[in-house]
Each structure stands twice: as structure tokens, then as C-alpha cells.
Amino acid sequence: MPLVAVQKRLPAHDSELTTSEMKHNTNTLKLKRLHIDTQIEHVVYMRKDCVIYKSEGFESMSRVQVSANNKTIVASLNIINKGVLHEGEAGLSESAWKWLGAKDGDEASFSHPPQIESMKHVRAKMYRQKLQRSDFKEILNDIVSGSYSNVEISAFLTSCAGDNLDLEEVTGLTQSMVETGHRLEWNNTIIVDKHCVGGLPGNRTTPIVVAIVAEAGLIIPKTSSRAITSPAGTADTLETITHVDLDMQQIQEVINKENGCFAWGGSVKLSPADDILIRVERALDIDSAGQMIASVLSKKNAAGSTHVVIDFAVGKTAKVRTLEEAEKLKYFFNVVGAALNLKIKVLITDGSQPVGRGIGPALEAMDVLSVLRNDPEAPADLRERSLVLAAEILELSECCAKGEGLIRATNILNNGSAYKKFEAICRAQGAFKTPVSARYVSDVCSSSAGTVTEIDNRRLAKVAKLAGAPRAASAGVLLMQRRGNIIREGDLLYRIYAEEKGQLAYALRYVESQTNIIFIS
């Protein structure tokens, strides 16, 4: 009979560790807050002599799964040669720290991330294969759960950019976005909303429209985004006046009291996948049509809206550049809206130049207040565009008969009740502040005489961003000229505001490198 070697497990001494104890001790580290801002990128920091770094075979920039406080993310690994971290410690970037809800001394585990099955759909889209609604749902669920790194999210966004999504895919993506988040429910049968597609600096009609429509008695729970590629989003602008980080309960309380609200959509997680995608889109400086439609309509649907007015500003340097493109987007919005039971009205408007004078959160807020207060010096174009949009909402919701919306909206603005409603909404949200401009200022004047024939929206917006907007809320550009204006040599074209001297100098260097931002002939 053959002999069989049997290895018997001897009882462990007190100083020995069981297999589970060894694993527990070798894949966990204590967290230390390093206060390193990497924007949206999740980063984990380890010592070069860390046992996990060595035993797991990690390399610098490896994808690492980090788990703490019953939450998990995928982060990029950075290695620290010496200092900063003690033995047994790991650090996290601020974005990762906040996502995990970490505190100094928390224990976190580190491992290779599992294979993400939904990445097969991303790879398929890279090769222009059509995705189904269920494919999008898998991808978005993984994104919301933190399974995707920013590199993988970037791959998804770029695979869907351009004309890579057909109408059915845009509809599926939109529906999947709604399904990943919460949805506001209202007792009213009609809930209205509006959205401007963007790409037009200073086009801050939303606060004015909400005030008019809410005063007219309609419910308008306005949730807005922060800037993606622009110098200011609606939420950025309104944050210079009031609090916009409202939760679901706060939104409902403000609506019940004042009919309208101004909330940042990211704070209520109505479409959390979209909020994550927007952050990466901002870093990539892209805003594709399919993603934009899905982003807008998923938020409207999740907010409980039933009637929505969409403003397409069309111009050579706007986001929508041609009437043909606008008509295609109009069709897409109507079809996808119908699939979500939304009644949509699309307006195609002039996008040849900025709206109002201010470009940047605080400067745009000043324009808004001047219109609402019926200041004689208020920008007429911002006032007129806001009245048209408010009128369309009043008529789309059948609050007014066809042709009477503009009269009703104008009366509400002219008699001061729109301003009172705006202030009441802001106070219901916890604040009514006065926006201020930045301390460092420089004028850009004309080097020739003639007529203003063209204003480059994109390059003027870039000046405002280089000056610090939207992160520096008081920074931006104050535009002093409009198309058709006759000017003399030395006349003021626009004024740049910055919170830091370096940012002002940075913006001015860009201005000096450009031959024409405002065209004069």
C-alpha cells in the first residue's frame, strides 16, 4: 500500500497569525489625509517600501481598488519615495477622500480591481457597434458605484462623442441615466422647466425666467448644472447670490412656499451618473450632442417636469453652429422627450454674440439683478430673451392663451413682482447676497476705429476662464460693445476681472496673442 504524506496543521502559537489574519494585515493600511487636490481624479498614495505595493505587484499609476467605510472606488496609484507617509499609512486625493467619507486613521483595504464586465460595451462602442438600453444601464451602474476610473469614463465619453450615438441610443442612454438616480414627485399635473443648450457667454436667462414663471403660479423646480466648458453655469452664477446645494427635502420646501427654486442638480443626485460624466467632460473639454441631450432630459425627467422649453442659440462660435445642426437637435430632443413623456418646445435663437455684459458667475449675477430690478442700464438683450422664454413656458403649459404669454411675462417683470419673487426664493433657500467683482482689473481697448462686425464667443469665453472663472466666482469679462456698434480708436471693448495678479496676466497674455476676438472693420 503506497505511503501518503500527510501534512498536519499544528496549533498556532500566540505570536503566529492565521491565514485570514495575515491577509487582513497585509492588504490594509491606515488612511492619512494629505490635502492634495487632483480635481476629479481619484489617487491613492503609498510608500515605495509598502508591503502591499510589493506583494500585489503594483506599479506607479496602477489601477487600485480602495475600500473603506463600506464604500469602494478605483484609484490611480502614486508612489512616495520617502517622507509624508509613515509605515502602515496610505494617502488619498481629496476627491477620493470625500467619496469614501474617510477620516484620519480609518482602515482601508487595497487590491487589484475586478474585471469590469460592462467595459465590453465601451469597447464595442469604440468600434461603432450599436449599444442597447441594457448596455448603457450596465455601464452607468458601474460608473455610479465607483468601479470605473476616470480613464475608463473618458473612454466611454469619447466613444459616444461626435455622431456616434443614433436616436435610439440617445433615448436608451437618457432612460438609463434617469434609472440610476432619484426622481422628484409632485402633486401637480403640470411641472415646467427650461434649458439653454449653452455655448453663449452670459446667457443667464434662467433666474429671470424662474422668477416670472413662479410668480405666474406655475411650479418650476429648476435644477441646474455647474459649468462644463463655459466660464459659468447657472448654479455657479446663482451661488454668488444664494445657496444652491439643496437636498430633496429642501427643494420641496422651497417649491411649496414659492413655486420655484434654484438648485444645483449635483446636490440632489437626480441623475448621479450624469454628474460624474460632466466632471470628466469638463476635464476633456468636450460636450457631445448625444451626451448633452441625455444629460438635459434625464435631469428634467428626474425633476418631475412635464413641459420643457429648450433654447438653441445658433451662431458661428456658439455650441450649435448651423441651422441644420439645430434642426437635427430639435428633432432628437422632441423624440427623446416623447419617450420620457415630456412635452418639449424648442426655440432656435440668435447665438452670434454674448448675451448681457457679464461673463463669469458674479458678473452674470449682476446682469440678472439689474434686469429683475428694471434698471434702465440693464442689458436689453438679456431682458428680451428672458421674456420670450418665459412667454413660451406660459403658453406651452396653457397658463396663457397663444399670443398672450409675452404680455403676461412683461407685466410681471415691469411691475416688480418678478424681483420680489426672486428675492423670496433666494431667502427661502437660506441667503440673499450681493455679488461682487474681482479686485484686479484691466481694460482692453480698440486699436482701430470702425464698426463691430463679429464677436468670437469661444475666445471671449476663454479670456474669462483664463482670468479664473468659474472657480474664481468674481472673475470674468465685462463686455462693453455689441455687433453693429460704431467705435473710435481707444474705445473700451471689454474689461477683465481677476482675483489674482497672475491670473490677470495670464488672461492678458492670451489676449495679446490673438489677432481678433472682437472684429472691427
Image: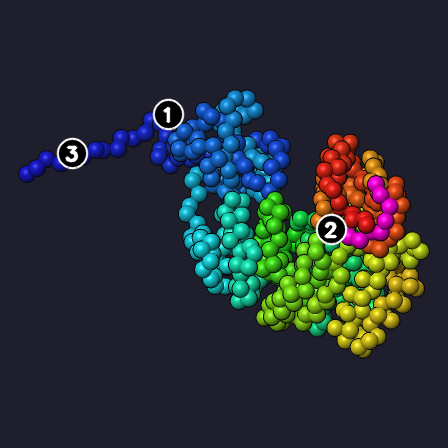
Q: Which residue is mark 3?
A: 5
Residue with the mark numbered 2: 457
Which picture quadrant has residue 470?
A: top right
Disc 3 marks a residue whose amino acid type is Ala
Return the x and y of residue 455 as percentages of the image width and height. Answer: 77, 51
Instruction: Estimate the spatial distance between the alpha carbons at disc 2 and disc 1, rounded to whole Å.
Output: 70 Å
Residue 464, placed above or below residue 46: below
Residue at disc 3, secondary structure: loop
Give, as a three-letter code, the residue at label 1: Ser
The colour scheme used here is rainbow
Between disc 2 and disc 3, the foreground one is 2
Of helix, strand and loop, which mostly describes the magenta segment?
Answer: strand
Quick check: 5 above or below 181?
above
Q: Nearer the viewer, residue 8 or 216?
A: 216
Q: Is residue 468 visible?
A: no
**Residue 215 percent coordinates (x, y):** 84, 65
Which residue has dot 1 on it?
15
Q: Mark 1 and mark 2 in contact (Cβ < 8 Å)?
A: no
* Quarter assignment of residue 462: top right
Which percent across, then down, holds residue 391?
80, 69
Circle 1 residues within 10 Å: few <14, some 14–19, many ≥20: few
Residue range (magenta): 447-454
Work out whether mark 2 precedes mark 1 in sequence or the reverse, and give the earlier one: 1
In the rendering, at what x and y percent does residue 504 appear?
77, 35
Extreme residue in the left direction: 1
Magenta stretch: includes residue 482: no
Residue 249: image tag: none
